[in-house]
Image: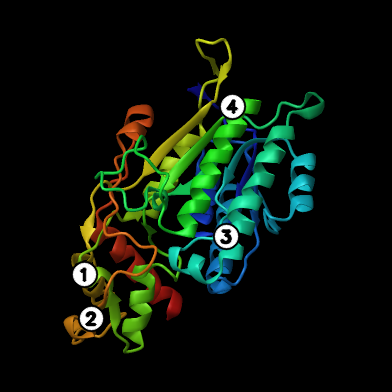
Amino acid sequence: MKKLELSGKDILITGAAGFIGANLCCRLLESAEYSGMRITGLDSVNDYYDPAIKEYRLKKIEEAAERSKSSFRFVKGSIADRQLLHSLFSSNDFAVVVNLAAQAGVRYSIENPDAYMEANVMGFYYVLEECRHSSDEGRKGVEHLVYASSSSIYGSNSSIPYRVEDATEHPVSLYGATKKTDELMAHAYSKLYEIPTTALRFFTVYGPAGRPDMAYFSFTEKLLKGEKIKIFNNGKCRRDFTYVDDVTKAVEAVMKGAPDKRTGDDGLPLPPAAVYNIGNSSPVDLMEFVSILGEELKEAGVLDKSLKLEERLELVPMQPGDVAVTYADTSKLEEDYGFRPSTPLREGIRRFAQWYKEFYA
């Protein structure tokens, strides 16, 4: 791979007010390694979930920029706004683009498929087009496009753990299908225009100030309202929970290592494209997860310690678009970057519970 120097470079991070995007911005801004880095953050700040959490994240980014005296500029808008995106690329020489903007969520893709086609397919196509033309008129152009994929592209793959080499042609949700489409488009652009691209397949990212539609967050809200928690597949589910700090460390590492531009045996360029799983490689039984969540919420003072969690559980069948197990094989990430996510679930849930208590107090 080609080592990239980020100091003094212009960086574009889309989805900057999102869960992973905001944490990544803070990590980069607070690092003394990247002197002179200039970050542009783009996000539509839509109301898919509570915008107050997105505003909270943006405030944290601004505070990180002030502390480090680093350069951060926020632009409100969507990657599906082609004119806005073109304006950003025309007025900046982005060396690295990290595309984290997307419409996320498996269940919502059943209710509102248009949002997924607009953001995940057309929006990402516009990003690819701008990267393609970023080297026009003698400009250096984008050196590396890093973009969010998802473990959802594996569908109900029976090969466990999921390896990046596994077949991904049969996702079981529209969300997964749009992320597979992104990987296919990126691969084609890498081949045709030699744009170095790296797909990151994220596995159930969680932590403080996370997405309210994720299970650990929605479970917490339901328990506080006195409602029951629906445990899908009658509790026979396992998830590879990945703490957000581990995820941003992985993204940071990958940003600095662009796939090499090489020539194949036929004399034609090989696509400089790579794919990595970003997961904890340690799937947890859903019932164990709920137990840990309940214990840490009580310890943080979010839930009353007298609450009997077992009385609040409702076992229900599997829902459409979901899978029984997610499990990441991260050997390729370890081999290329010497890093693997490792934060224990209890530690990560404890930090979430403490944040929840503080934020909603």
Give the residue at mark 3.
116
**Which amino acid does the dot numbered 1 rest on?**
Gly
Relative image position of residue 243 (x, y in whole percent): 35, 54
**Looking at the image, residue 311 lies above or below residue 286:** below
Q: Nearer the viewer, residue 16 or 263?
A: 263
Relative image position of residue 34 (x, y in whole percent): 56, 36
Q: Which of 249 and 151 is in front in this view?
A: 151
On the rendered structure, is 19 left or right of 121?
A: left
Distance CA(mark 4)–CA(mark 1): 44 Å
Q: Which of 36 and 310 is in front in this view?
A: 310
On the rendered structure, is 160 left or right of 212?
A: left
Q: How many labels does the image show?
A: 4
**Which amino acid does the dot numbered 3 rest on?**
Tyr
| SS at mark 3 in the image | helix
Label 1 with label 2: CB-CB less than 8 Å: yes
Residue depicted at x 31% and y 56%: 241
Distance CA(mark 3)–CA(mark 4): 25 Å
Of marks 3 and 2, the one in the foreground: 3
Relative image position of residue 130 (x, y in whole percent): 71, 40
* Residue 241 appears in the figure: yes
Give the residue at mark 4.
191
Sequence-wise first label, 3 or 4: 3
**Which amino acid does the dot numbered 2 rest on?**
Leu
Crowding around mark 4 (Cα neighbors within 10 Å: few <14, some 14 to 19, many 20+) is some
Give the residue at mark 1.
235
**Looking at the image, residue 46 lies above or below residue 274:** below
**Which amino acid does the dot numbered 4 rest on?**
Lys
Distance CA(mark 3)–CA(mark 2): 31 Å
Quadrant for the C terminus, please: bottom left
Sequence-wise first label, 2 or 4: 4
